[in-house]
Image (cartoon, rainbow, N blue to C red):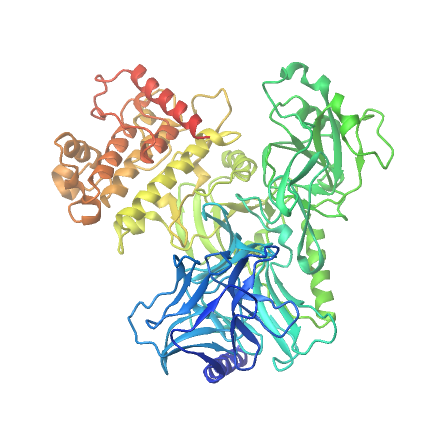
Amino acid sequence: MAAALVCSIFFLVITLSSFADAQTDTAKVALGSTLYANDDNSTWTSESGDFSFGFRRFPGQEDQFLLAIWFAKIPDRTIVWSAPAQPVPRGSKVELTPDGLLLLQAPGSSELWSTANRNNEKPLNGAMLDTGNFVIVANASSNIWESFRNPTNTILPTQVLNVRDKLSSTLLEKNFAKGKFELLLGSSELMLRQRDVITGYPYGPYLRVPNVLQLIFNESGDIFTKQVNNTMIQRTEGSFPTSANFYFRATLDFDGTFTEYIHPRNPNGNENWSVVSVIPPNICFIRVDMGGGPCGYNSYCEAGPHGKPKCGCPPGFSILDPNNPYSGCKQAGGNFHQDCNQLQPIIEEERIDFFFMDGADWPFTDYEQLTPSSENECRSYCSRDCNCAVAIFQDPKFNNGNGSCWKKKLPLLNGRLDRGAIDRRALFKVLKENASSQLPPNPNSRKKDQDQVVLILSVLLGTSAFLNFFSVAAISLAIYLFGQRKFYSLCKTSDERDLETNLRSYKYKDLEKATNNFREELGRGAFGTVYKGLLPSSTRNYIAVKKLEKMVQEGQKEFLSEVNTIGQTHHKNLVQLLGYCYEGEGRLLVYEFMQNGSLSSFLFGSPRLNWQQRVQIASGIARGLMYLHEECSKQIIHCDIKPQNILLDDTFTAKISDFGLAKLLINNQTRTLTGIRGTKGYVAPEWFRNTPVSVKVDVYSFGVMLLEIICCRRCVEFEMEKEAILADWAYECYHQGKVETLVLNDQEARSDLKKLEKFVMVALWCVQDEPLLRPSMRTVTLMLEGILEVSVPPSPFSYSSLSSSSLESLNEKSASQSKGRK
């Protein structure tokens, strides 16, 4: 350990000293210098000639240019940085102004982009360094601006990423618009995540490395992370050519992989960049809950050389954008049938046929699982379900003698193809009269009862942990034997999933080891205790292990319901269930670890969240509950909504946790028959009455918690005398027109009085004594987001002033408005 640390520090010292030396290898650019977008020779070049700064013709467009930095001596002149305003027309110019700014202007002198001089420092000159860093120099020890501090998709040796720095992939290899992947260094976590290309909205990460302060790329081409405890961890290994003979770069590629490349400095012939490291090692096995993954919706991903993705469309689908093989797939020719209005379900099976694709799977988009099942039964289940577009059948030989059938809707996510897997088959539903005319020819023998079905020889992306382990091991060994460099296991992708549930099944002894014999307690609940764990082979590294200590008999049924239903529940505002342990009397659930802990510590402790953070958190919780109540295949009542069960990730996104108290409802079930559940102060009145219990108990608890979020105080505080019961006090303040009294010490909230009043009104609707008067969580969400007006709430404890028909009208109005948003 000590030797490794000394080695790491040694490399860091080399890095920093090399960076200092590199400052002297410059081609200075005088203030007032200008470059024009007229030809590719308009550049500022480093002293060695290795790098150039200037305009490059935009690929395929004669009169469009890119302001960029590139490798100047290699044939393809690879771009390593580009300005955000892309592309720019011929005749545009960039000037290093006397004020020390880079100013990009269109031919008519309109500003397209510029750097900033935030400290109003006096500039000396600009310089294109031999490191590939363009700097605007203020003095010998200070730069006004530098490209290394404003990276795009690539980092170079001597470059360091600090907290809040990020890389953004390009849309395609030769399309330099921002793509759909980001590498971000958060407050203490390095992550790879997907983003919406149009809005820039970030989705959940598909790879995380915890406790990171810096990502360092040293002059020798080694990549380190500096941890929060100031230790250095080398993320590459192996013996490789020196930087004297090779160029190095590390790029977040358009396919979502963070890839390190090398290129000979003096190439002989047509030598190209060689891949030496790829993270993650198999991009096809990442798990994304939104965004389509590397290949887009309705597609499948197959691992190519170096783990790079090869994308394809299943039979009956075609590429969405022929110019972009990663754009996803669309239904071709109306072949598929997923229309509940077109045919009556009772006769639908007579007109339905299937073709199959061995080796393909979309493992995280199931809405129902049926076990045991034969293949013919699986076809029948899907035929009779107008919502079912695709079914995945798992051979009983690979599942303890029980076949399984997973039903899926469109669009499909996380598509995978593994040409060596034989354990499951994808069944695609088609209209029988179209099957023979529109599907590709059958290369193999046909089943007797499947005359119209075309056999497709393909590859299955199976989820067998055994096969995946040896696939990854074989790839890793091959890379090692060929002497190529590779990253250490920053984290493994979530490719090991139990065949029965699409979740990973852990052994008790492994979780016992991961939690250090259940040493570090994160919290306690009605059904057990949660512990912090560390799995070196996990993509998430840190985990939260919930040990269910009171579910040996009656609890076993609830545990199985949790695993089978919650395992298929995916939402931005829900804590993700990663796996489980079902061994002897051991019942454990494995969840993703939330960096910032529970909401309660930020409401009732120090430091406290600001008003805007609280607003976003409240809306996120509402959306999560709406999903549980209305958008799951089986409705879920949480039964214990409170701040302690709301966890916050590193970006303070709210995630609902602790489904150990959740009660699953069959479609026609309107009440639970179990005892009172929940926590004092948050429990709805109907728990104490002999009346049906519904999703409205969660609405009540949410209303209590919303008041706590608004006021940053607990729902019951007896030492405050007249203000002891928060709901009573909140209604009194609202009724008197003094809602600002609720946030006396919060100037930000007091200055946002309109939203403050709206949130209080929504909370008062939620805590109505009568369940019928409480709005649905969909209505709550629409009111919080300002889409639906909030009417005047009555006293929560006297509901004679409002009829149930009035509330039904309110919910109908919200339903119509929400439909209009789709």
Q: Position of residue 550 (x, y in %)?
A: 46, 41
Q: Is residue 681 visible?
A: no
Q: Is residue 793 visible?
A: yes
Could you tell me which residue is drawn at 29 percent across and 17 percent down? 806
Could you tell me which residue is drawn at 70 percent across and 42 percent down? 360
Q: Position of residue 104 (x, y in %)?
A: 42, 62
Most foreground residue, 297 or 517: 297
Res 447 → quadrant: top right
Residue 136 vertical position relative to residue 547 in the rendered view, above or below: below
Q: How many marks?
A: 0
Q: Position of residue 444 (x, y in %)?
A: 86, 36
Side of 549 where 123 appears, left or right: left
Side of 641 where 667 appears, left or right: right
Most foreground residue, 706 or 552: 706
Q: Which residue is outermost to the right? A: 445
Could you tell me which residue is drawn at 60 percent across and 49 percent down? 294
Residue 503 vertical position relative to residue 272 in the rendered view, above or below: above
Most foreground residue, 739 or 640: 739
Q: Position of residue 508 (x, y in %)?
A: 57, 51
Could you tell me which residue is drawn at 75 percent across and 21 percent down? 433
